[in-house]
Image: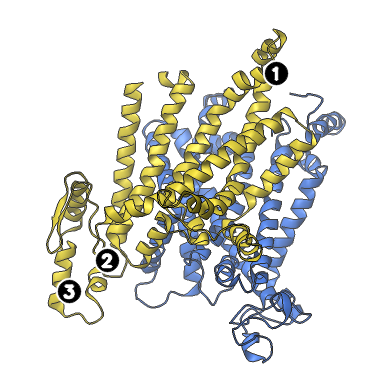
């Protein structure tokens, strides 16, 4: 494995092992040491943290900037939009007043829309990722550890879930989830759409992680340390939490860093298809829906959310790679 | 081998049945009443009841589902609409056309889009992966890995629309994306689909480059490759006969999954480029609460995924004889 052309993390690993002999370090500290030396990883982490800060601090940013994503500036203030509803100023109406320009026809401020949109999309994606990771962990470990009929049954359910045409199904059944959650035919409230989106994304997202962990547990449970724990009379709970889980954190962390950007883009894709958040809530994905309707006259409105999404997903994927390297420098890329 | 295939096919059929049943059940939780939609704005109760009866939705759910399944194999007679021959998926609630005909009508657009793009990303992805593996750590390898990372992170609705703006409407390099049957106008068929193919290829190539590169790097460090080299085998035949062969299994897996998913659900791609394929058809079905059409597109989409899985399994058994024993 350690060939002359091996990558930087492998070199780091050897130097870390040397220091380890001098000072005792926990695996977590070692991982942190390796990660800190990975420049790409650190930069991507900063970008990802920046996006999360934007999402968390959206109201503060909007207050400092002095606009909100709801006011129809273009319609209230004459001279901003032309007769066709497109911004008068060049490049989608970018000015010192409206940093990212104005939304065509409605005339909302694009900068605050994007900031709040990131908040909405990241919020849904984070919640969905956490729930599906927990589900994946529980189901995967139960199937792998219990074995036998449980394992067979769970395995078939995973196969089935992965065979569903997911996008189609989510589009088709978003109204169903809505109608189950609200009894009447009235327009569902805003938070409910977020809940339905999260449920639908989670319903199809857990299976991959569960399948992966099931396989890991199957191979772990025959290992000596698990056998030893069983012989000494450890309870199943102790074996799961103290023996199995510590060995599973690496695949879990790697998988969830892959899942989160996938959920952000999935949410954006659904909004693009018109089944995402409603018109009143600023949403990253819905900006694309509007942008693809007006792009021939106002490409700027497409570029800001598009570039932001691309930067976020690239940074997150790079971060995922770096975390994997930091956890396990032996893994080949 | 035959037993293996039969077992996998039966399992696939069971999965399809369950997916259809779930779709059927869930659809009935939708508040919209298809009979009311078919009946129109002003709808007296008798006409509504008649519409219900004609659509066959006045019977118990189980009966409806069973007759839906039976109709696929033996056909079915509809009151007021006539006989629907063997692969019968019912009549659309909206336009009263046989659903099967509509599907057959739209399928070529989706197939042309998918297969064309698949040819590009498979060939291009494997080729760049091989080059990257052979030039490990060199500039070409780095360019390949950076561009594949960006490619994998790109969204169709962003890049597709951006490319359309610049290359179709500003520079007029590409024709406006549309589907023209190849039998009518081969040149129009090609130029109409070229941009969607390229965009899909940008997104999907990344996976193949990465997968090919990593398996190839691994295989190249195997003892048998070194032995072959030591015995004086030329570089090219080592790559073709051993190294490339090792990449076959993972590539077949992701190719099968990608192809199945694309055939069944190129919804975002078709929406971005305004192509009238199965993806657009399913969006219409959802928006119109058109149950027979929705059932049919879900069935086709699921079948594409499941069938591709069986094909992948079968190919595994051909590539790697050890699989057949398990």
Neighbor class of circle 3 (other Cα within 10 Å; few <14, some 14-19, many 20+) is some
Q: Which mark is residue B95?
A: 2
Query: B324 and A131: which one is in front?
Result: B324
Cβ atoms under marks 1 and 3 closer than 8 Å: no
Query: In the image, are marks 2 and 1 on the same chain?
Result: yes
Disc 3/disc 2 C-alpha distance (Å)? 17 Å
Q: Which image quarter: residue A298?
A: bottom right
Q: Is label 1 on the same chain as label 3?
A: yes
Q: Which residue is mark 1?
A: B235
User: Can residue A332 be seen here?
Assistant: no
Residue farthest top in this picture: B231
Q: Quadrant of the N terminus of chain A?
A: top right
In this rendering, is residue B119 above or below A234?
below
How far apart are the alpha carbons under marks 1 and 3? 75 Å
On the rendered structure, is A235 left or right of A57?
left
Chain appearing in yellow on the rendered image: B
Q: Which label was assigned to residue B81?
A: none
Q: Nearer the viewer, mark 1 or mark 3?
A: 1
Chain shaded blue: A
Q: Which label is found at residue B48?
A: 3
The residue marked by circle 3 belongs to what chain?
B
């Amino acid at each position: 494995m350690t060939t002359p052309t091996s990558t930087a993390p492998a070199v780091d690993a050897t130097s870390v092992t040397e220091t380890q002999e001098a000072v005792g370090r926990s695996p977590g500290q070692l991982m942190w040491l390796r990660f800190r030396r990975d420049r790409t990883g650190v930069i991507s982490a900063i970008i990802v943290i920046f996006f999360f800060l934007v999402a968390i601090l959206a109201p503060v940013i909007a207050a400092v900037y002095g606009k909100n994503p709801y006011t129809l500036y273009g319609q209230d203030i004459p001279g901003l939009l032309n007769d066709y509803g497109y911004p008068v100023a060049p490049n989608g109406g970018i000015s010192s007043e409206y940093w990212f320009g104005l939304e065509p026809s409605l005339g909302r401020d694009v900068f605050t829309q994007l900031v709040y949109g990131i908040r909405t999309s990241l919020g849904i994606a984070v919640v969905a990722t956490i729930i599906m990771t927990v589900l994946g962990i529980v189901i995967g470990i139960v199937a792998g550890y219990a074995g036998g009929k449980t394992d067979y049954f769970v395995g078939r359910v995973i196969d089935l879930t992965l065979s569903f045409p997911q996008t189609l199904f989510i589009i088709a059944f978003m109204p169903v989830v809505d109608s189950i959650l609200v009894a009447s035919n009235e327009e569902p409230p805003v938070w409910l759409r977020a809940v339905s989106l999260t449920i639908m994304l989670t319903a199809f997202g857990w299976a991959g992680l569960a399948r992966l962990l099931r396989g890991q547990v199957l191979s772990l449970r025959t290992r000596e340390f698990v056998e030893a724990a069983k012989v000494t009379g450890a309870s199943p709970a102790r074996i799961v939490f103290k023996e199995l889980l510590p060995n599973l954190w690496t695949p879990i962390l790697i998988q969830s860093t892959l899942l989160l950007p996938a959920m952000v883009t999935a949410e954006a894709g659904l909004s693009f298809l018109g089944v995402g958040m409603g018109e009143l809530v600023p949403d990253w994905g819905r900006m694309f829906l509007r942008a693809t309707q007006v792009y021939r006259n106002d490409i700027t409105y497409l570029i800001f959310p598009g570039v932001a999404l691309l930067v976020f997903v690239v940074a997150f994927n790079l971060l995922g790679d770096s975390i994997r390297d930091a956890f396990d420098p032996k893994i080949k890329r | 081998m035959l037993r293996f295939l039969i077992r996998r096919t039966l399992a696939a059929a069971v999965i399809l049945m369950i997916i259809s049943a779930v779709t059927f059940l869930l659809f009935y939780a939708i508040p919209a009443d298809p009979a009311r939609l078919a009946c129109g704005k002003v709808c007296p109760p008798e006409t509504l009841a008649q519409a219900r009866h004609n659509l066959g939705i006045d019977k118990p759910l189980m009966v409806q589902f069973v007759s839906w399944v039976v109709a696929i194999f033996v056909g079915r007679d509809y009151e007021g609409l006539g006989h629907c021959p063997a692969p019968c998926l019912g009549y659309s609630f909206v336009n009263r056309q046989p659903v099967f005909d509509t599907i057959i009508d739209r399928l070529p657009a989706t197939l042309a889009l998918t297969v064309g793009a698949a040819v590009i990303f498979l060939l291009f992805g494997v080729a760049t992966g091989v080059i990257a593996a052979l030039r490990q750590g060199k500039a070409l390898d780095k360019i390949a890995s950076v561009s594949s990372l960006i490619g994998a992170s790109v969204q169709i609705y962003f890049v597709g629309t951006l490319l359309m703006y610049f290359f179709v409407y500003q520079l007029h390099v590409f024709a406006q994306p549309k589907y023209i049957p190849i039998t009518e106008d081969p040149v129009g068929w090609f130029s109409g689909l070229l941009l969607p193919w390229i965009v899909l290829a940008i997104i999907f190539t990344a996976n193949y480059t990465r997968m090919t590169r990593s398996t190839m790097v691994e295989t190249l460090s195997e003892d048998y490759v070194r032995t072959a080299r030591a015995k004086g085998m030329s570089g090219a035949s080592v790559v073709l006969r051993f190294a490339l062969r090792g990449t076959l299994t993972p590539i077949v897996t992701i190719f099968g999954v990608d192809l199945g998913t694309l055939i069944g659900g190129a919804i975002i791609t078709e929406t971005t480029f305004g192509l009238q394929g199965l993806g657009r058809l399913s969006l219409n079905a959802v928006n119109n609460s058109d149950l027979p059409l929705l059932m049919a597109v879900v069935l086709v989409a699921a079948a594409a995924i499941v069938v591709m899985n069986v094909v992948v399994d079968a190919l595994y058994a051909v590539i790697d004889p050890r699989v057949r024993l398990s």
